[in-house]
Image (cartoon, rainbow, N blue to C red):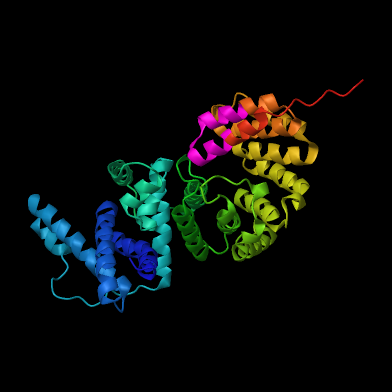
Amino acid sequence: MDEAVEDLLRQLAPQVLGALVRQYGQFDASEDAVQEALLAAAVQWPKDGVPESPRGWLITVAGRRLTDQLRRESARRHREERAAALAIPDEPLAPAADDGPRRDADDTLTLLFLCCHPALTPASQIALTLRAVGGLTTLQIARAFLVPEATMAQRISRAKASIRSAGAQFSLPPASERAERLRAVLHVLYLVFNEGYTATSGTELQRADLTTEAIRLVRDLHRLLPDDGEVAGLLALMLLTDARRPTRSRPDGSLIPLAEQDRDHWDRRAIDEGVALVTETLARAPIGPYQVQAAIAAVHDEAARAADTDWPQIVVLYELLERLAPNPMVTLNHAVALAMVGGPAAGLDKLRALDGDERVAGHHRVDAVRAHLLEMAGDFEGAHASYRSAARRTTSLPEQRYLEERAARVAGRPKPRSPRR
């Protein structure tokens, strides 16, 4: 498919879906009809050209598909009157009226809230968001998460059924619930980005299609909510992190750690945009976790060399982040920062806070950080054991190879001599 057509369809998908759900009130049936219309456009537009009103074209085609489906269902249930009431004339239609940018914006935001409904699991929220708002096909989502298409189709189907059972309406949640629901939306988009930036399993270290889609959706959300500090913070965090993507792996797919990356090949335009966003946001909005994470990413990205990194500032930012949003991954990164400032013993002492924490029991990153700190401390035997343990626990082949290489590198190093008394 032509790249420009594909980008246009992804942009229009939530607008068209919002128009249908608003009119018919059936999320799952409307979503299926929109997918059929998108497929028809993907086949027809590259040959015949993009219509004058692409949004109206999609609404018309999707509306006809939905009406046909409703007619069939009504016929089976002997509800011809209802089908007739919902029918769209068979003669050629004029392009659907454009309700203006504000209605499109409302619909896209409403769709995001609906896809991140609290009745759904995080996995279902991610799948439904990518399908309904991102415009990805079930097959594309399945490939991204390395599951069979039938499995992903069932997950999406169950998600839509759960929304229906919960009695969710196509409307923005009450004002009293919006802040909490927005946090769920941001978390889902954050998870999508993280899965793309470092795939949790498979042969590829990263999936650019997911990181690109996450950035696009957050950018759209930022346009809808320009005054929200955490939306801006998440966009900045994604831009500052994704800027390093071209240098994170070698041609053979092997991982390159941050300290060894060629910073001349980082995306400076993305870095400049991310720094500007987080600088402006921190100056005017209440501080939130995504803004602090973006500030940490900015400190890394603004250092010309790894040795120039302002680690004391990063330690301060992690202390703030732990107060705002304490979680094991923050503690892990905080431990590394402490080691860079106060030595490996300080980092290892911080890492002990995770001993017995069931949330990361068996997680490979705990062993990987411990191995790194032990290597810094000169405990090569302990580092070797922890690197091997981390390699066994990860399901990402690039990470596994990297950890095994680190284990092999420290295996042959002699123990440091004890100081003479």
Q: Nearer the viewer, residue 335 or 100?
A: 335
Quadrant of image for the C terminus: top right
Depicted 227 relative to depicted 408: above or below: below
* Range drawn in magenta: 386-404
Q: Quadrant of residue 263?
A: bottom right
Depicted 206 relative to depicted 49: above or below: above
- The reply to whether residue 287 is visible in this rendering is no
Depicted 9 relative to depicted 233: above or below: below
What x and y, as percent, mark residue 261?
64, 51
Q: Quadrant of residue 339?
A: top right
What x and y, as percent, mark residue 152?
32, 44
- Direction from residue 234 to residue 298 in the image, left or right: right
- The reply to whether residue 133 is visible in this rendering is yes
Q: Nearer the viewer, residue 281 or 210?
A: 210
Considering every residue shown, the one lying at the far top of the view is 421
What x and y, as percent, mark residue 367?
60, 30
Q: Is residue 398 magenta?
A: yes
Quadrant of image for the N terminus: bottom left
- Direction from residue 116 to residue 93 in the image, left or right: left
